[in-house]
Amino acid sequence: MIALIQRVSRASVTVDGEITGAIDQGLLVLLGVEQHDDRTKLEKLAHKVMNYRVFSDENGKMNLNVSQVGGSLLVVSQFTLAADTGRGLRPSFSGAGTPEQAERLYDEFVAHCRAQGVPTQTGRFAADMKVELLNDGPVTFHLQV
């Protein structure tokens, strides 16, 4: 399971002209599900995302997590993160989870974050989404479990 997280001042997702999720300060989480992902990996990655210290403290050091700064998550499914780009000029998605598996784990990831008390907004699974963000930094990390 892969999360590309970006520290944002604001972010939103629009589907068919309708905003489906929007946050101010927080993390935009692009979430990719791979074939062998399961509940254990989901919980480990969610814990890492929610507790990753990417926000600055009073000394300008990245020592605070999203909850400590009163931030939110915007979680967007992105199967392309599971692409194999090692050969040729066209990505292979053979390592990506099935759409059914990915949707189930995506929904569980969101529910898990919400259950931990982190305000969480979403895109719409498998939709053609327009993601808008103001990256703060920029600060972007690739997390994988």
Image (spheres, grey):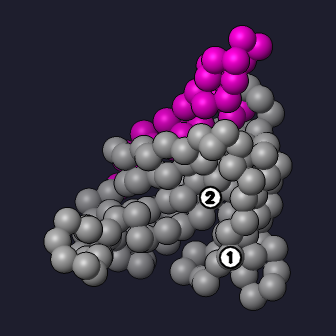
Q: Which residue is mark 1?
A: 130
Count of numbered badges drawn on the protein? 2
* Circles 1 and 2: CB atoms closer than 8 Å: no
Q: Residues within 10 Å of mark 1 (few under 14, many from 20)?
A: some
Left or right of 48 on screen, residue 10: right
- Does residue 4 lie above or below 138 as drawn? below
List the residue tagged with mark 2: 75
Q: Which residues are magenta?
A: 38-67
Residue 3: percent from left, percent from top: 47, 52
| Circle 1 SS class | strand
Which amino acid does the dot numbered 1 rest on?
Lys
Residue at 20%, 65% in the rendered image? 86
Work out whether 95 lies above or below 74.
Answer: below
Where, quadrant-wise, is the C terminus in this rendering?
A: top left
Regarding residue 54, the answer to whether it shows in the image is: yes
The one nearer the camera, 30 or 115, is 30
Q: Which quadrant is home to the N terminus?
A: bottom left
Q: Is residue 27 above or below residue 68?
A: below
When asked about the image quadrant of residue 123, the answer is bottom right
CA gap, disc 1 to disc 2? 13 Å
Say the numbered circle drawn on residue 58.
Answer: none
Q: Residue furthest left?
A: 87
